[in-house]
Image: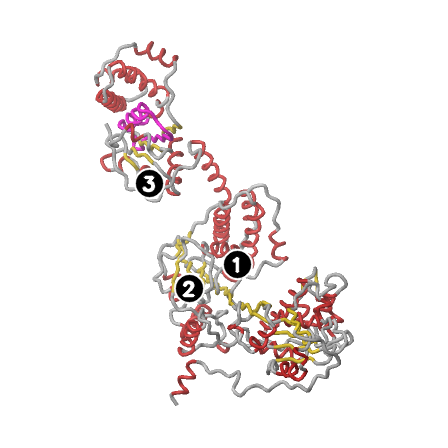
Amino acid sequence: MFEHGKIQNLGDYFLRLEKRSGRSVFFYRINGIDDEITEFLLNYYESTRENGTAIQGKIPNPDGKNLMFFSEMMGTDFKLEKFFIGQSINRWLPRLSTVQCTALADALYGALVSLRNLGKNDNVLKNSYVKFMCWLYYRFESVVSRIGNDNAPKILYIGDMGIYDLYILNVLSNSGCDVVLVQNDGGAEYSKLDPRSMLSDPFVKNGLTGFPDGFGISFLQNLLSEREERKKLYGNPPSVRNCTNAWLSGEIFEDIKKAPVTRGGDPNLFYNAFCRVYGAEDKVTYQNELYTFYLDIKNSKRGYVLINNEIPLPAPPEISFVNKGTYHGVNQMISDLSKRIVFQQNKELEKLMVKAFVDVMLEEAEKEPSNINRLVGRAVHLLCWLFRYMNTLFSGWSMPFVSVFIFFGGCKTEFEVLFLKMLSKLPCDVLILVPNLNTKCILEDKSLFERNYVQSLSITEFPTDHSGLRIATAAYHAERELDEVMYTGTGIYRNHQYSKANSVTLKTMYEEISILWDQELKFRPNFSTYGDTVNVPVIFAKVSGVKDGNVQKYWQSVKDLLTEDTFLVGSVPYVSANTPNSMKYNAASFFRNGKLQREAILRNQYYRYGFLREETQQLILDKIQLLIDSKLIAGTFVNGTEYNIAATALNLQTELVRLIQKYDFTKTNPKFIYINTTENPVTQEDAIIAAFLNLMGFDVVFFVPTGYQTVENYFTKSVLDEHQIGEYMYDLQMPKMKIPPPKPGKGTKNSFFKNIFKKGK
């Protein structure tokens, strides 16, 4: 009989007997699955079709005809003797050689003795003998006819089994067959039949999962069919393949600069890198290191592409060039689109491109195979980008050279992830640089080599021009780090730390206006920050009447509110429909489907805010859109009021615009005071300006001693916080009021380091 050997790995099953220790056979049971085991079972099942058999579930008992034929041929005698069993097998299976008969007889005799030792009586042993003989003839005759060959016959058994199934497998194994037993239930039933694992060995591996529902022979057949279909997708395979990252030393910049011919010696491999670097090893030298790295790559005469922050989306001509069709299945789609890949300069490289594309798309298809439209969109992106960059990267390519693709800023879309994965399978070094640790690169791949540094650097572009290269000093970086400590979650804010603001209107008592008026916003109730946005608590109020009828005290209370950042309106109306405004002539072109066309506004010849900081201009446009969307101004989207809103907000006086530019959202906010002592009506333009400045974060207060209606006539909802403070008075004359000049030294601030150095003088 053959001895049961021990495997080092599942691949040992495919060794010929002469390569195995002691010419042993293997009998292992597998109780869980992973990718490696799936691949093994597919290959093993294929081998059973050529040299063995596969069994799904329990082996059917011999039927009446089988038993009658056996009785006619062999009689009814039975002796538990090796000689008797040997003679019986020789007569029953005449095609077997003497060696095969002897091996099978020894194995069958041993199995029957084991059953006797389990307490089976003579009648049971005879029935077992007949069953085993019938199975050998009707189920396994083609298998046992191959025992003794150097290529051991293969038996695959999937499913739960009874004791006789186990013993016939043991007979076959001992006579010279390899056996793999797949236990869908994890081995619970088997442990009852062979609790000490005397007949087979367990295959032990960490991380295995349970078998999928319906796992069996048909399951493997379907996988094999899919594998055959996928082989057709690749066409003729390339003769070379990638060796990715295995050759790296870990010093990524130096590794990528290394000449490809010095990376390894196998002529069938190209040695490429697929790496990501988070952060900077040394913030002071990082930008210069990038610049010198860029010069080295440029001077190496290797093809290279440098992308900052995002790969530009495919343009319509690029998409139409791909010329996609209508598809009813994943394989059909991949097969058709892969035919678009043509690289006349080098057909070997074309094969590599096809393989990389198919690999990536098949992997992506596993996530959501039924969503063909989604997969087509991803495939089109990959091909558009491949066609865009292939000549730059691979013109004149020959083994073993590799090009370089540098992506600065990290992947933000799945399209970019798939494209970099595809490039990593080609003769191309793929380097992803993410110096800002607050930036997330969404690419995840088991082949990716990653280097992480603790220092973070906020730069937006890869430095390629020394004339524009700005390298910060150690002191500068130290101050930025100190800024991060001092100005993150501490309630202390640096100048213009935030670029966006959301106004939150406070509902207050009249007396609170003077208390809150000159108070920094960060000390007001409901102040908060989130990301780059500040929630600023503001006042939006109307003060009606004169407290106690005391006119002098009334005007003094108004004067007390005048600050250097106050804009005062004392003549009604402030802006009328007849006030010159060039933006009105173009306002209709500023909208499409109710949304501002920002580029049209910024390009308009009458646009007046181009001198402001970019973030301030965008904030102004944000608030105009918000005011329009809120429909606060009566007539919005009814009679064209939205055009007047845009034109009015884009035509503010220079003094107001300067206050907006100066406004720091964490400090004292600018003020807008509107005084109306007459019966003159305010205009829609005045209402628009007041509502817009409220959204911008101004404190806005109307003083109306007459108590008459003002801007609220133009509002569709109550947003003004009105205070009735005293009797109504008419025909009051507003005294001269003057905005105070800036306080000496206000607005200047030395940095922490400057203060230290100043003290040291």
Q: Which residues are magenta?
A: 146-175
The image's mark for residue 11 is: 3
Q: Is residue 222 above or below residue 546?
A: above
**Helix or strand or loop: what does disc 2 sit on?**
strand
Expressed as whole percent of the image width and height from the top left, the position of residue 98 reads: 26, 21
Q: Is residue 316 at all visible to an observer of this figure?
A: yes
Nearer the viewer's eye, disc 3 or disc 1?
3
Q: CA distance from mark 3 to mark 1?
A: 39 Å
**Callout 2 touching callout 1 (CB < 8 Å):** no
Whether residue 148 is visible here, answered yes or no, is no
Task: Give 689 or 458, whichever is nearer the viewer.
Answer: 689
Mark before the other along the chain sequence, 2 or 1? 2
Could you classify mark 1 by the number of other residues whose Cα lies within 10 Å: few (under 14), some (14-19), or many (20 or more)?
Answer: some
Residue 210, image x and y in percent? 39, 38
Q: What amino acid does circle 2 point to?
A: Tyr
The residue pinned by badge 2 equals 278
- Tag 2: Cα neighbours inside 10 Å, few (<14), some, or many (≥20)? many
